[in-house]
Structure formats: structure tokens, C-alpha cells
Image: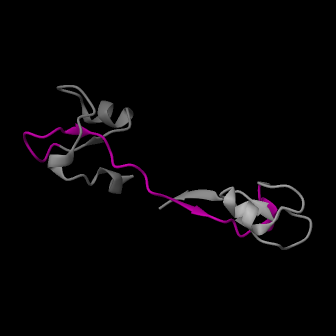
């Protein structure tokens, strides 16, 4: 993503080799910017920011517990807990989304 390439020039980490083309740099998952001399032009992007959310759709839940699991036991495992509706997991995994 473009925002991942907004790295302060002095903090750029070289990601390519001398003379690498923009296409080759991007092909290996790196950022390319030649606007500033004396810093890497092909450099590593910032890590993606991710957010863990509890899915709203009860039918897309992926079971993280067992029948009769208590809310505290579920959240201790790092999972979501919602005691409704019947017939779906009440203790379920988070969904990870990019910000």
C-alpha cells in the first residue's frame, strides 16, 4: 500500500541492489523512490497495521472454545465471546483486518 512507503529518508532500509529497476524493486515487495539522493531508493516498506475485530455475523464465527465455556475462559484464550444467538459458537476467533 502507498502509505507503507511513506518512510522518512534517513530511516529507509535498503531492500534491493545497486542499479535495481523500479519494476524489479516493486516485484520483490519493496518501495521505490528516486527523489532523494544518497539514501536507498529501493527500501523496505513499513509493516502493515492490522486490527483484530470480533466478527458481527454470527454465522461466520470460527469456534475457539467448547460447549459451556465461560466468558472469562474464552477471553483468556484471546478469543471473542458473545452468548447469542443459539446454534452458533459463543467463543470464537477474532478476524484480522488491515487498517
Residue 13 x/y as whole percent: 24, 39
* Residue occupying image coordinates x 68% and y 60%: 76
In depth, the one of 40 and 84 nearer the eye is: 84
* Residue occupying image coordinates x 34% and y 52%: 4
Report the number of discs: 0
Assess whether residue 57 is covered by the magenta stretch.
Answer: yes
Q: Is residue 67 left or right of residue 40?
A: right
* Color style of the picture: one colour
In depth, the one of 83 and 87 nearer the eye is: 83
Of all residues, the one furthest to the bottom in this rendering is 84
* Residue occupying image coordinates x 85% and y 55%: 66
Residue 67 x/y as whole percent: 90, 59
Residue 85 x/y as whole percent: 86, 73
Assess whether residue 67 is covered by the magenta stretch.
Answer: no
Report the span colored magenta.
Answer: 34-62
Picture quadrant where residue 15 is located: top left
Amino acid at each position: 500500500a502507498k502509505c507503507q512507503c511513506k518512510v522518512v529518508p534517513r530511516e529507509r532500509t535498503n531492500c534491493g541492489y545497486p542499479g535495481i529497476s523500479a519494476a524489479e524493486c516493486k516485484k520483490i515487495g519493496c518501495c521505490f523512490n528516486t527523489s532523494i539522493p544518497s539514501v536507498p531508493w529501493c527500501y523496505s516498506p513499513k509493516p502493515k497495521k492490522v486490527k483484530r475485530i470480533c466478527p458481527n455475523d454470527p454465522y461466520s464465527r470460527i469456534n475457539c472454545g467448547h460447549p459451556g465455556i465461560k466468558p472469562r475462559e474464552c477471553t483468556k484464550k484471546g478469543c471473542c465471546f458473545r452468548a447469542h444467538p443459539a446454534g452458533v459458537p459463543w467463543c470464537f476467533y477474532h478476524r484480522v483486518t488491515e487498517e
